[in-house]
Amino acid sequence: METPWTFSRVCREWRAVCLGTPRLWCIIDLNLQALSERDHSCNNYAAYVSILSTVLERTADAPLHINLTLRCHQSRSLSHFRPIVQMVFDHCDRWASLTVSDGQRHFVAGQYHNLSRDVTHLDLSPLKSDSEKPISGSVAFGSLRSVTLQIAHDLVSSSDVQVQELVRALSSAPLLASIVFQQTDTTFQQRPGRFPVLRSTQIRHIHLLGCLLHESIPMLAGIELAHLETLRLGSCREGRRHCFHTGVDSLEMQTPKAIHMPELRDLALALEDEGYKPFCRLTIVPSLRRLELSHGSCNVDMSVIENMLERSQLRKPSIEHVSLHFFNLMDITCTKFLRRTMFVNTTTLQILGDFVTGHLFDCLASQDRTLLPNLEKLEVNISRVKSPAILPAITRAAGAGLRVLRVTLLQPESVWADELRALGSSHPELKVEVCLSDFKCSLGYMVEPAILSDLFNSANAAVWMNDRDVVNRNIEENAELLDMLFATLEKIIPKLYELEPDYWLTDELPWIMSMICEAGFIPRDDQFHFKERAARLGELWFQH
């Protein structure tokens, strides 16, 4: 008989705790997309207003963390929900963090061109048009410390003035320390747009993701760079590295003679367009501790990055954390890069994606330990691996003095997970973490589309890129890797009739082989016969 009374008393006490603790109510997630999909006619509008009013009342005067998704399933829903957004905006002086998202688009096969008519784009007008307090001027984001804007590229193109006004107001908040500006439209590279200029003297952390490097740098024109601690520039995507832009060296004409960031500790650069060159030539980062480089191909000049680091005269003898993400056919060049003196005391190495061979890991496992001799933690995501030889190489590297090994594998390669865990059992000083990815490829990992992505980038660079010296030097240095990819294709193409067709193979392979055949000069072609093999692979493809 006592149990119901005990339960009731506990519930009453917990209810009192909840109602008397404002911080439990301070995270407000207002997702108009979800509401409009659930309630097309807005029949529950009064209930939404009541709930939000109650939540805001229970927050008392505590700082608010606001997440807004301002995309609606139907255009008419925006006008219905706008007053609800305004209720949150009326408390903007208490916002501690703000995340504005354009939500998720609804992709239906064969209906991409109807997308803009089926789903409305992000609408920022609730933040200003219905308010007696305009965004600029009397509205003060006095408590705002963190801002995240996930904006579709088509919005930036069509509503540039509106976005500029919002970003200008938010970045002027007196306590703002962190801002993330993320373009979410994956087609932005084909339709480069205009981007807001940030203006602030107190921001410490800036992430400009989804925009090309030469487009993102002008956004920093009003930032006090002397206080920056984190700067992450470039892509937020794993694919679509094929960019054709000219005139980016004009960046040197638009920026100061030097970009001096004395307190910067974390720098991330996407190398998918030429903007990294003038940026690195101008930049000085004496306090750098973490370096992340991504989306590099054989058109990337690693010496430009080396010169930036040497010119910075690092206050400590080495960078502690290095990340290399999605490099194409650059294993040997990257290994050479990591042998520089600024990495002698590096303790953490993170590798994500397209390393083809076990070359780097074999160097880590060598007895002389000249490559990253003080490395303690190795993180490898090889869910896109093309060569099975990489896994034994990782195992050998892990047994050569590492303390932590974290590996992400494809689900079909779970047998390697057992071997890696066994490695941890035999080396008590080594902590092994294994994650299994659910990524599936119809043709198996040996012919995962990243193979052709690598080949495309190399062929594209060999045919089209202007900096011939850099391209030729990188291809010559990594020719063995290109040879391995050709050998893989030569092995699998005769067996393709047994397998399910794949888009990349059916549509891209003949074109890529044709590009290689037409290239004017490919280094070490006399040794590996790349053009001759490309022609033969093209013929094999049409036969099978």
Image (cartoon, rainbow, N blue to C red):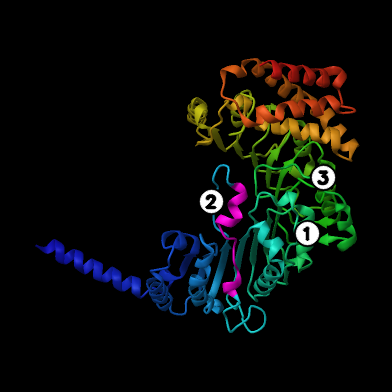
Find disc 1 in the rendering and name its residue: 217
- Dot placed on the residue nearer the N-terminal end, 1 or 2: 2
Residue depicted at 70% across the width and 34% down the height: 453
Q: Distance between the residues labelled 2 and 3?
A: 43 Å
Tag on residue 306? 3
| Residue 497 horizontal/vertical position (percent) | 60, 17
Q: Is residue 462 rendered magenta in the image?
A: no
Q: Label 1: state its secondary structure.
A: helix
Residue depicted at 29% across the width and 68% down the height: 14
Magenta residues (range): 112-127
Name the kind of residue labelled 3 in the image. Glu
Q: How far apart are marks 1 and 2 (CA)?
A: 32 Å
Residue 365 in view in this figure: no
Find disc 2 in the rendering and name its residue: 106
User: In the rendered image of this protein, does residue 511 appear above or below residue 163?
Assistant: above
Q: Label 2: state its secondary structure.
A: loop
